[in-house]
Image (tube, rainbow, N blue to C red):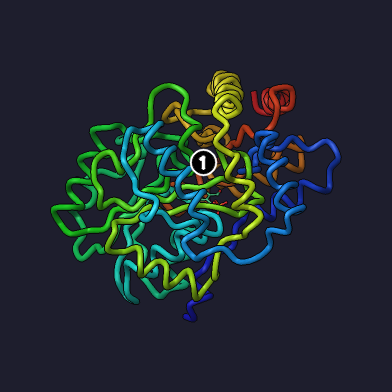
Amino acid sequence: MGRIDKVSPFIVMDIVKESQKYKDTIHFEIGEPDLDASEKVYHALDKAIKEKKLHYTESLGLLELREKIAEFYAKKYRVDVSPDRILITCGTSGGFLIVYSILLNAGEKLALTDPGYPCYKNFSYLLDEVPILIPVDKSTDYQLTSEHLKAYTDIKAVQISSPSNPTGNIYSEEVLKELIQYCEEKDIYFISDEIYHGLVYDKREHTALEFSDKAIVVNGFSKYFCLPGLRLGWVILPKDLVRKAEIVMQNVFISAPTLSQYGALEAFDYEHLNNVTHTFKKRRDFLYSQLKDIFDIDVKPEGAFYIWANIEKYSNDSYRFSKELLEKIHVAVTPGIDFGKNNTHKYIRFAYTREISHLEEGVKRLKEYLL
Ligand SMILES: Cc1ncc(COP(=O)(O)O)c(C=O)c1O
C-alpha cells in the first residue's frame, strides 16, 4: 500500500457538503469557533497591512510574539518558558508535522488514543511512521494511562490531547503527571496537544510543562483565541530540540504567516478571552443537559466544544445514523467513525459552535424525531 493510501479522508466533510443542500440545517458538525476574536486583533492586522508587513519573519517566529506566549505561560500556569524554546508554526497542524519529523524515524511508533483527533495518525503515515492506536473508553474517562502503555514495547513518542477532541474530557492532574513520569522513565517523548486549553469549564487545566521540562507542548490560535484562519500555532520544545525544529521550519515553511503573527500579538486580551470561555460554558451546560435525555453520554465533557454521544439505542452505524439525521430532520452531526475504530460506530460527536437558539432548535428536532 502506498503511503498516501493509508491517509483517511475526513468523513465529516461529506456531511458538511450534504448539509449545504438544505437552507435550514442545524450545525452540530463544525469544529471551529463561531465567535469573533478580540477587536484588537483586527486593528493590529489592519495596521500591519498599512505598514506592509509582508516579508518573511525569522523561522522561529517574531520574537515579540514568542515573548507574549512566554508571558502567557507565566501568568496562566506559573511556568517559566524561555522565548527561545518557542517555535511559531503554521497552525498546530504545521506544529505536529515538525514535531513528528524531528522525534521519530520511519518505522518508529507513535502512541495515540482511539478515539482521537484523526490527523495525528495521518501525519505519522505521511512520515512513514507507525501510529499505535490505543483504545480508551469510559473506564478511564477516555484518558490514556501509564497502564495502557505498559502493554506496548518500543514506543518512541506518545501524543495526547486534553481537553480532547472528540470526547471533551480533560486529563486529571494525577493521570497526566503519572503518564509523563512513566514516559520520562522509559525515554519516551511526551507530546501534549493543548489547543483546547482555555475552553475548560469546571476545573483548572494543567500544561504538561508543569510536570516536566522535557514535555513537548503544541498549542495555537484556532480555538480559544477564535482565530482559525490565521493558521498560527506554537510548539514549546526542550532546548536540545529547538535547532532541529528550526531547520525543518526553515526548509518546509520558511516562516509562519507574517500578517498573522502581527495580528496574534493582540490576541492575549484576557477580558475578551474570559467571555469566550463563559459563552462556551453556557452552551455546554445547555446542550449537555438536553442531550443526556436523548442519548447515553459516558463522560460529562469538561472542555473543548464537543459532546460524544452513544447512539446504540437508535443505531449501530454512526455513518448511516448521521446521514439519516441530516436527510430527515436537517441536523448535521459528525459520525464517530471519523475518530477511529474503537466502537466509534456507536457514537456521534456534537459540536456546540453556534449560539444557544440554534442549539435549541436542533434539540427540538432531535427530541421530536427520536423520542
Ligand atoms: C485536537 C486538535 N488538534 C489540532 C487541531 C488543528 O488545528 P489548527 O491546525 O487550526 O491549529 C484541531 C482542529 O480541529 C484539533 O481538534
**Residue 153 appears left or right of 368:** left
**Residue closest to the eye, 119 or 253:** 253
From the top left corner, tell me how far across and down residue 37 is, in percent.
66, 36
**Which residue corresponds to mark 1?**
347
**Residue closest to the eye, 92 or 350:** 92
Location of residue 40 (image quadrant): top right
Q: Residue at x 76, y 43 (%)?
A: 327
Disc 1 element: strand
Q: Amino acid at mark 1?
A: Tyr
Location of residue 248 (image quadrant): bottom left
From the top left corner, tell me how far across and down residue 251 is, in percent.
50, 76
Can residue 287 be spotted in the picture?
A: no
Q: Is residue 319 above or below residue 356?
A: below
Q: Is residue 237 above or below residue 307?
A: below
Can residue 197 be spotted in the picture?
A: yes
Quadrant of image for the C terminus: top right
From the top left corner, tell me how far across and down residue 129 is, in percent.
37, 71
Q: Residue at x 53, y 23 (%)?
A: 292
